[in-house]
Image (cartoon, rainbow, N blue to C red):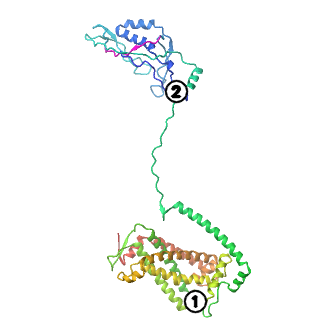
């Protein structure tokens, strides 16, 4: 029978930082195994010799260590029992031999005991059952083995708790396993808008807004102090912020002007929105090709923007013509050099938050007059002229004209003009609402100089119409209209 490893295998420590369990003092030694090997040899030679060897061995009794149960919920295995172990003798070299199925010393025709293993069921008998095996006539020769020295370890009693604690403290703790971090995915580059991320733009807006607020507060305090000085008080007396119009100047706001004002706001909002889409869209949703020029192809957004421009120019032409026909032009066109000092006076009053008296039904203050004049007669023509230069209405067979008015110049002017209109609309609406909202809205929308809610409700309805136009301005609605003047496709 083959002789396996003579040292007991050690496992994990019983206490944190302790040594492997069981200690080597409890391991089997070669001397302890030697009687077992002798027992196996005797069993192979003669069955009665086995009983004599076991009976003569000086073996103390020890309780067998129990482990985990063999079945879920069962008792620890093996069952608690007392086993007699061979007496401990002086360690001696043990020969590790490979034994043939039938020992060579067995005489042919005799019988030997069959080797038995672990039980098949918990608490059962070793398997297979004990039975004699006849020795065949031709027995295999035994294989010689080289002797190997046994470990110099003695079988002793289990250490006391004090000794175990001392041994555990003496054993250095096992080295901790170092875990390496898994490779991380590369971080995604944040999306940038005009070279900056959304967080950077938010920081610029917050810091810039705080700076503008601080500068505004300081400007108000400074101008209020300035207007309290005698020279500035005399200046406000001589130039209150407006000058008298000619006696023939019309009074009030006619209905046609109110409608022209509404159409101007409606078209301007859509023009600004579509113009911004042209600058930001990277892939147009559809394209438009005119019937009279199949070689030309523009995006549907550009067509919508240019169509709105044509309607806006038409509305502006009608507005300017009616201004001069009805005499309303005198309210927004300066007729005296006094407009400049009065505009300065009105500006100082606005900054000091002690605003000038609002009387737009009869006359605008000089700062309003200059602003309306610049918007109607300077900014609007610049927007129209630069828009025509960048559109398909510009003649392509006029190289000298194109050289005199390059398209790059038109692009450089067109966008700042759009920004001017955005700023003008914001300040215009804010001042209308802050300087007597009900009366001003009645002037613009109801055509009456009264303080009631009529103009406000008309203004609210116009806002709803403008919002509806913005929502409807999408390819699903624009494409059928554009197809009336050309072909819409990809």
- Residue with the mark numbered 1: 330
The answer to whether residue 72 shows anywhere in this view is yes
**Reading the chain from its start, which is encountered first: label 1 or label 2?**
2
Residue 363, position in %: x, y? 62, 86
Indicate the secondary structure of the residue bearing disc 1: helix
The answer to whether residue 362 shows anywhere in this view is no
Residue 272, position in %: x, y? 49, 74
Number of other residues with Cα within 10 Å of mark 1, as a class: few under 14, some 14 to 19, many 20 or more:
some
Tag count in the figure?
Answer: 2
Q: How far apart are marks 1 and 2 (CA)?
A: 103 Å
Relative to 278, 101 lies left or right = left
> Does 147 lie within the magenta span?
no
Q: Main secondary structure of the magenta part?
A: loop
- Residue with the mark numbered 2: 13
Q: In which quarter of the image is residue 473?
A: bottom left
In the drawing, what numbered circle is on residue 3? none
Q: Is residue 354 placed above or below 195 in the rendered structure?
A: below
Which stretch did the figure color magenta? Answer: 90-101
- Front residue (pair 441, 265): 265
Residue 235, position in %: x, y? 70, 83
């Amino acid at each position: 029978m083959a002789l396996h490893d003579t040292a007991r295998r050690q496992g994990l420590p019983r206490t944190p930082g302790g040594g492997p369990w069981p200690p080597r003092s409890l391991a089997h030694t070669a001397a302890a195994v030697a009687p077992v090997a002798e027992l196996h040899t005797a069993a192979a030679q003669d069955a009665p010799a086995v009983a004599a060897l076991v009976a003569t061995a000086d073996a103390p009794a020890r309780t067998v260590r129990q482990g985990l149960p063999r079945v879920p919920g069962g008792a620890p295995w093996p069952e608690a029992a007392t086993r007699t172990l061979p007496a401990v003798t002086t360690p001696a070299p043990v020969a590790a031999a490979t034994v043939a199925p039938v020992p060579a010393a067995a005489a042919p025709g005799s019988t030997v005991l069959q080797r038995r293993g672990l039980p098949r069921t918990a608490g059962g008998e070793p398997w297979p059952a004990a039975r004699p095996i006849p020795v065949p006539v031709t027995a295999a020769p035994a294989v010689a083995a080289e002797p190997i020295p046994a470990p110099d370890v003695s079988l002793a009693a289990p250490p006391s708790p004090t000794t175990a604690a001392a041994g555990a403290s003496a054993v250095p703790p096992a080295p901790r396993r170092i875990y390496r971090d898994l490779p991380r995915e590369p971080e995604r580059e944040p999306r940038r808008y005009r070279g900056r991320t959304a967080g950077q733009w938010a920081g610029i807006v917050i810091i810039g807004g705080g700076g503008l607020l601080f500068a505004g507060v300081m400007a108000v305090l400074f101008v209020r102090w300035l207007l309290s000085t005698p020279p500035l008080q005399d200046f406000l007396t001589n130039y209150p912020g407006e000058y008298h119009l000619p006696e023939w100047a019309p009074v009030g706001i006619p209905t046609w002007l109110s409608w022209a004002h509404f159409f101007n706001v409606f078209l301007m909002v859509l023009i600004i929105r579509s113009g911004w889409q042209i600058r930001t869209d990277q892939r147009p949703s559809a394209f438009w090709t005119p019937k009279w020029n199949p070689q030309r192809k523009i995006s549907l957004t550009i067509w919508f923007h240019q169509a709105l421009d044509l309607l806006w120019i038409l509305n502006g032409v009608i507005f300017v013509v009616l201004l001069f026909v009805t005499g309303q032009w005198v309210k927004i066109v300066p007729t005296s050099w006094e407009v400049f000092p009065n505009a300065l006076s009105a500006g100082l009053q606005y900054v000091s938050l002690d605003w000038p008296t609002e009387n737009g039904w009869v006359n605008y203050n000089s700062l309003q007059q200059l602003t309306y004049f610049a918007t109607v007669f300077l900014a609007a023509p610049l927007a129209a002229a630069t828009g025509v230069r960048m559109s398909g209405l510009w003649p392509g067979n006029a190289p000298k004209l194109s050289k005199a008015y390059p398209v790059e110049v038109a692009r450089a002017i067109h966008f700042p003009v759009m920004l001017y209109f955005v700023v003008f609309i914001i300040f215009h609406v804010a001042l209308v609402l802050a300087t007597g909202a009900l009366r001003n809205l009645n002037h613009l929308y109801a055509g009456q100089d009264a303080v009631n809610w009529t103009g406000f409700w008309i203004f609210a309805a116009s806002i709803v119409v403008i919002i509806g136009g913005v929502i409807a301005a999408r390819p699903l609605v624009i494409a059928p209209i554009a197809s009336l003047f050309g072909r819409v496709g990809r």
